[in-house]
Amino acid sequence: MVIIRMLIAAWLVTSGASAYDEYFTERTLRMDYFHSGTAREERISLDGVRLEGPWPGSRTQLLDRTNLGKYLFEIVDAGSNQPIFSRGFASIYGEWETTGEAAAGTWKTFHESVRFPEPRRPFQLVIKKRKSDGTFSEIYSTRIDPTSRIVNRSTLPPNGTGWSVFESGDPQFKVDILILGDGYAAGETDKFHADVQRLVGVLFETEPFKSRKKDFNVRAVDVVSAESGISNPRKGVWRTSPLGLSFNAFDSDRYVLTYQNRTLREIAALWPYDALIIAFNDRKYGGGGIFNLWATVSSGTGPSGYVFVHEFGHSFAGLGDEYYTSSTAYEEFVPPGVEPWEPNITALLDPAELKWKHLMDVGTPLPTPWNKDRYDQYDLSMQAKRTQLVERKASDEEYEEIFREVKKATTPMLNSEKYFGKVGAFEGAGYRSRGLFRPQLDCIMFTRNEVPFCKVCAEAIHKVIDLYTR
């Protein structure tokens, strides 16, 4: 059986579109489900199966070889019992279970979706979760007959007006980005268009997206809100917006998520997309990004271009946050002794097997020394100032002044380090000051300084682009 499985997997990799035509139609299926639990218990239950439009993804890269994500879903052909499609992903639930609330036993439920080409025959949809040793184990499975009455084949209702930012070719050979707006009132459509053009411009002036721009299509949808802006609970601001974005996710002041997944998916379903971004109309600094889910960005904040690129790094390539002094709701995002799945963070459990050692110069020590104490002393003092701003509900301009002050101080501080610009393993990453390491001293995933993605992050982005375009 193992040999048969390997042969089918090899055929799926090498036979290209012929394998796709054998197993799939030209349409997209979306399975919606509820993901519930605490830090110790986890349950998944089916909500529904929805037929969407044409499948926008690759016809040749059917099995995901990137090894990214806290979760993995597989489409298993019922006849051969072999996987014919797979993708890694992360989720809001996956973050929730690392919070103090979840550890205390509080149950919560989140609505989630997985999308895949519509199989021609009955199949098993399997969801797996990564274990501490890096392998995956099954946590949910359901059998689905695509011709059965459980599949919702009703016409997708029009929601918003779609338009092209730029297009480079057939969706099956490109990464298709779809940008939705939230908190844009009826008279602010022109602002949304200008915000999208500006933010997309920043993304594609940033390597490696700049050199791979021809591999992308970018489209946007005008989603009209009844009022301008989104909710900000810490300031007592509550607004009804179509996509339900709000600050204060997991009680983190600047973290912006939505829990209205089904609404979001129904609006997006009319357009081809591999990656979703939600630009929200607000002056306050904030955003979020979860791998293979979506990214959010405040279009009105001063550093919005940076936030757009940083959060897309999370949602598109699975990049982890490399900073570690900012407060978060996570208590054990990466447990001690576990190697993170994110490509740009390591626990350095075995320096000889460092996952980015092929990018290192000979002679670079591991761990790589840097003046961490000096940086931490300064950065923690600025974090304390930011906490004070939150507590007194300071203006957005005051926050941005702090950002400028940090940038002015930390740029020369990091640039003066002996191993600046070198790939190594610098302690401090993934919300932990000790025990986790990042590849380079500075990177878009570490600070807001004028720096590019580090070499490790750039390589990871290239690999995900290839997954959608090769």
Image (spheres, rainbow, N blue to C red):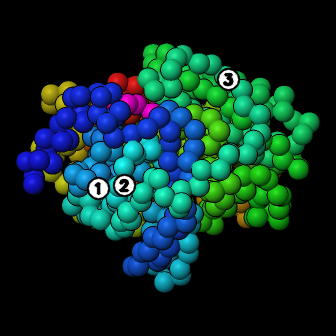
* Quadrant (top left, top right, bottom left, bottom right) of the N terminus: bottom left
User: Image point 87% across, 43% down: which residue?
Assistant: 185
Label placed on residue 352:
none
Mark 1 or 3: in front is 1
Provide residue 148's location: percent of width, then percent of height.
48, 58
Q: Left of 176 or right of it: where is 417?
A: left
Q: Give the Cα distance between marks 3 and 2.
A: 36 Å
Crowding around mark 3 (Cα neighbors within 10 Å: few <14, some 14 to 19, many 20+) is few
Provide residue 396's location: percent of width, then percent of height.
77, 47
- Mark sitting earlier along the chain (3/2): 2
Label placed on residue 78:
1
Residue designated by label 3: 164
Quadrant hosting residue 238? bottom right
Residue designated by label 2: 122
The secondary structure making up most of the magenta span is: loop
Query: Element type at marker 1?
Result: loop
The magenta-colored residue range is 57-61
Provide residue 374's location: percent of width, then percent of height.
43, 47
Q: Give the Cα distance between marks 1 and 3.
A: 39 Å
- Mark sitting earlier along the chain (2/1): 1
